Image (spheres, helix red, strand yellow):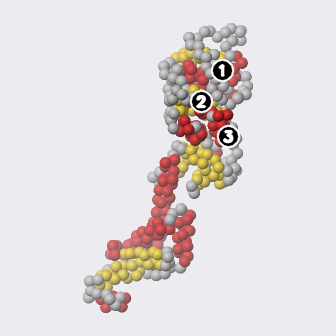
Amino acid sequence: MNINNGFFDALKSLGEENSVETELLIEKVKSAMLKAARKAYPHSEERIKVDIDPLTKKFAMYIEQEIIDDYPIDENEINIDVARTIDPNAYIGGKILKEIDISKLGRMAALSAKQSIKGDLREINREQMLSRFESKEHECITAKISQVDQNRGTVTVEYDGTELYLFKNEQIPGEVLEVGKPVKVYITSIVGKTKKPIVKISRTHKDLVKRLFEQEVPEIYDGTVEVKGISREAGARTKMAVWSRDPNVDAVGACIGTKRSRIKAVVDELNQEKIDIILWSDVPEQYISKALAPAEVLRTIITSDEEKACTVIVPNNQLSLAIGNKGQNAKLAAKLTGYKIDIKPQFDTDNQEAPELSQDFKVEKAVSEPEVTEETPAVEIPAEAPETENAAPAEE
């Protein structure tokens, strides 16, 4: 039976729309038609064959009949005399293919075949999605912006022929994304892996910063420099603590790069978000002091090991910088270190110096972007759990 070109053209279009090879799609159509024919011919299940050839535009279905010299009891048998009208060389005990009229399969069989093909396509798409993205889960990819929904704020990006959706709450506040431009996104997770996979992407996730530095800093990529912790307020500021396994490698300097080239590349990608690179320390007082960069810290003391609380003394003119606009700097330091931080000025309103504390560390300022903040009174910042799996707990 020859089918007009429309069927095979539709088959080709269906394959292109679903990124499926025509050969694979033909196998799925064959399977669906076999299921439909077996319902129509329940006694011939194992004898039905399907032949689809896109080159010759041939689409045919057959029942394999056994040639006998008696009267056939069902469609699985054929009399020798009838068989020789089809094939003059037919013989008793041989086989002959009887073509099935596809149009007579019935509406239900055709509907069943259609549903079966749809199911196969869904499964193919699921497998393709997983093969394309499963290895990239928790990684950074570069996609191309294909559409921006001005009403909902959703941005559609394309990666390897697949459309992904960057929702408003996963975009950096204040950032303008333009159609046609490349954008780096972090794959936070793939949900619905056993049914319909959905790839979730983000530009606000803290680990996007880590992946970007891995791309720019070979020492992080090869493990020489380790990222110990990250705290982030997307669009405003990120604090990243680093440590070098090699005493000859400057962890902070490696992240900055010559003429600040490496850190600048990350800052540019994150819409000029400020980034503080902090040298991690296993001495809590030192780590906390550095985490409050760009503010200068005079003294730090752990007031409670059990509650992970500390008091930090800063020069009066550094108080607002240490706290940050709306407490942002201190909050990020608390998230990074896991400590509840009580920030106090060096002198009180009566010009009395803060009492001496048991520990006094001179701490080099961490590298950071300059920040202008409003005058803010001393505040106590509650601790939060470190925001990264790699955040190292401070030793008591």
Q: Residues within 10 Å of mark 3 (few under 14, many from 20)?
A: few
Residue 176: image location, x then y, percent: 70, 45
Q: Nearer the viewer, mark 3 or mark 2?
A: 2
Give the amino acid at mark 1.
Glu
Which residue matches tag 1? 296
Residue 215 found in image quarter: top right
Residue 273: image location, x then y, percent: 67, 36
In front of the other: 291 or 103: 291
Residue drawn at 49 percent across, 79 percent down: 56
Residue 132: image location, x then y, percent: 51, 53
Residue drawn at 64 percent across, 28 percent down: 367
Residue 268 disc label = 3
Marks 2/1 in contact by CB < 8 Å: the verdict is: no
Give the amino acid at mark 3.
Asp
**Distance from the alpha carbon under mark 3 to that under mark 1:** 26 Å
Residue drawn at 39 percent across, 79 percent down: 62
Residue 252 disc label = 2
Residue at disc 3, secondary structure: helix
Total number of numbered discs in the rendering: 3
Q: Residues within 10 Å of mark 2 (few under 14, many from 20)?
A: many
Residue at disc 2, secondary structure: helix
